[in-house]
DNA sequence: ATGAAAGCGCTAACAC
DNA sequence: GTGTTAGCGCTTTCAT
């Protein structure tokens, strides 16, 4: 592998001159620049990026901690991140965590080991207390709100959105409402339950099923909800694919939508437009874009992204 | 930032000893190892990965050239790649190309600049002739078949699958069949047209619409197809979301599916199971997994992944 | 078992 | 404008 020394020698100049032409330094004698360029061309030389990153102490790469990589919501987020990164000539490395605390720490260590200039946390398993110390080694941006001043945030106001969604159902006359969530231990599940309590009063546990992420889950869960002595007249699903599953099961039982059962999903995904399912659009792509911007700018701002309810025919 | 020299000094050993404990070298005096470990702990030291990569000449990172990052088919592929990478403790950097030749070359240069150990090309704009020279600098794996011996391939036999799909429609009694594709200039479009010609004879241009990728495209395209003097009785869509759009438009025109119009999609996506759309499943996740394996092993094998047709209610 | 020292390939401060 | 040189932080011979 030919390196900068070889080029210098062959062009009859010093390495610094080669380095200068490589970095488009202004004041170089025309002939020297040209002969360097010529040798570079001839030798088909490309500088070693690792060496550059080492000496510069930065990589123009951002790591994205993503619990699941086959989840449409996180895909939307990632999409936004990639758009912004591309725009700014940054690279994105995907770091699948599967909500493992150990994996997350491992990835944060990579920030410390100077592999990334920053890390975006789409969702996390660890406490902030264990994450925050790593903000010394690069910018850490969260896609969920936190008050900690060390952490930048690009987030949507989940709680209000849940409140709005439940209120929306209530205004449509629904009294018995059920909902699904992804992970019992997650923050958003807590907020969901809180919002439910605020709108409909104390949650009866059978009206909440967790562990849902795909269409099949929705299908199954619908079966359980509809078996309840007092069955729900509306279901708020944590994703349009789950909502789609619920829709299908309801149809299979000859229920009419929305008259017999109302359904509202989340994240405005293609399946939802396909099946005409109302949804709460948290604009995850924008959340991702903004998160990436913050990471690039090493900003610790807190940026709120607006959400909105998209009404279709399922409520 | 504390480095290996500091640790060595503080532990009263040489850098090589520190390096050895860092790399779990066997033969180190117990006390020395322990005191090094202790200092590392105290100083909260993490080795600089750039320095390691530089000296080792490898990064355990693979770049994935992906035309679009908001496309469900490529998401499936990426999903498989990430799974395999995680399993093997490799990192994945996503390289969005948008089918720009310049971008692709830029990414291949990064392979040459030692940023990645290998590159997976999900789909490409450049000729193989311009890509192949880069295989000197790391393994290049394609998700499309090519005969070039320098390139590893994890692929599905598109042509046969198209043939099978068209034959399937023909056997169901369809004579007038239309189809959609994503990009006119792509290889798969050429194969699609070839397969059509083989099964149904010379393609009338109005039965093929290109530039389709999402549900909305499908909806629009369906309108055009159904306006044709002799309208198709079946449509093969290049993706289940496109198929979903076609489905919706057909429904909006009071057409019965599959009697009035048969629809078959591709890639077995959630929307397809939701709407009951038959599909050609190319198992893109497996294609991705295999591609990643090849890249990691620096193998130039050609591995064919089987596809199958999933029959639902739309044909 | 351990240390000294020569790299890996590049940048940038300094001197001229 | 250009060259010399001291790093960046690590691995890995080669002695001992």
Image (tube, coloured by chain):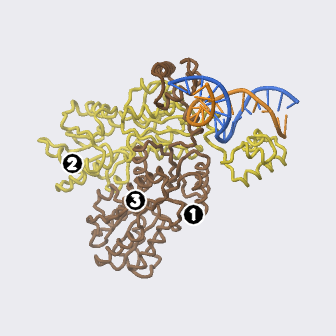
Chain colours: A yellow, B brown, C blue, D orange
Chain ID for label 2?
Answer: A
Q: Which residue position holds label 1?
A: B128
* Labelled pair 3, 2 in contact (Cβ < 8 Å): no
Mark 1, mark 3: which one is toward the viewer? 1
Chain ID for label 3?
Answer: B
Q: CA distance from mark 1 to mark 3?
A: 32 Å
Q: Which residue position holds label 2?
A: A220
**Residue A313 position in % (x across, y down):** 30, 53
**Residue A301 position in % (x across, y down):** 52, 30
Asked whether residue A294 is in view, the answer is no
SS at mark 2 in the image:
helix
Mark 2, mark 1: which one is toward the viewer? 1
SS at mark 1 in the image:
helix
Mark 3, mark 2: which one is toward the viewer? 2
Q: Residue at x 44, y 40 (%)?
A: A95
In the image, farthest residue toward the left: A229
Q: CA distance from mark 2 to mark 1?
A: 48 Å
Q: Which residue position holds label 3?
A: B215
Would residue A104 appear left or right of A218 to someone viewing this image? Answer: right
How packed mark 2 is, by other alpha carbons closer than 10 Å (few <14, some 14-19, many 20 or more), is some
Q: Residue at x 47, y 69 (%)?
A: B189
Q: Residue at x 21, y 30 (%)?
A: A202
Q: Residue at x 26, y 64 (%)?
A: B312
């Amino acid at each position: 592998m030919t390196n900068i020394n070889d080029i210098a020698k062959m062009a009859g100049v010093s390495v610094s001159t080669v380095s200068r032409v490589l970095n488009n330094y202004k004041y170089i004698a025309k002939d020297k620049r040209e002969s360097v360029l010529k040798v570079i061309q001839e030798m088909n030389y490309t500088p070693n990026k690792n060496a550059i990153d080492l000496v510069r102490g930065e990589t123009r790469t951002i790591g994205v901690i993503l619990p699941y990589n086959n989840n449409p919501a996180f895909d939307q987020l990632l999409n936004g991140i990639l758009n912004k990164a591309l725009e700014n000539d940054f690279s994105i490395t995907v770091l699948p965590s599967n909500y493992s605390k150990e994996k997350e720490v491992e990835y944060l260590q990579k920030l410390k080991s100077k592999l990334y200039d920053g890390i975006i946390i789409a969702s996390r398993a660890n406490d902030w207390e264990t994450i925050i110390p790593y903000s010394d080694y690069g910018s850490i941006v969260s896609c969920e709100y936190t008050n900690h001043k060390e952490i930048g945030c690009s987030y949507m106001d989940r709680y209000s959105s849940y409140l709005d969604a439940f209120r929306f159902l209530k205004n449509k006359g629904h009294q018995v409402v059920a909902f699904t969530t992804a992970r019992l231990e997650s923050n958003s599940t807590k907020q969901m339950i809180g919002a439910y309590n605020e709108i409909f009063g104390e949650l009866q546990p059978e009206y909440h099923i967790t562990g849902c992420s795909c269409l099949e889950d929705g299908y199954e869960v619908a079966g359980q909800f509809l078996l309840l002595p007092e069955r729900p007249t509306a279901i708020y699903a944590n994703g349009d694919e789950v909502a789609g599953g619920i829709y299908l099961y309801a149809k299979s039982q000859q229920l009419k939508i929305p008259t017999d059962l109302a359904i509202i999903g989340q994240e405005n995904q293609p399946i939802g437009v396909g099946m005409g399912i109302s949804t709460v659009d948290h604009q995850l792509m924008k959340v991702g874009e903004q998160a990436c911007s913050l990471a690039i700018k090493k900003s610790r701002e807190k940026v709120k992204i607006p959400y909105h309810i998209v009404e279709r025919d399922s409520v």
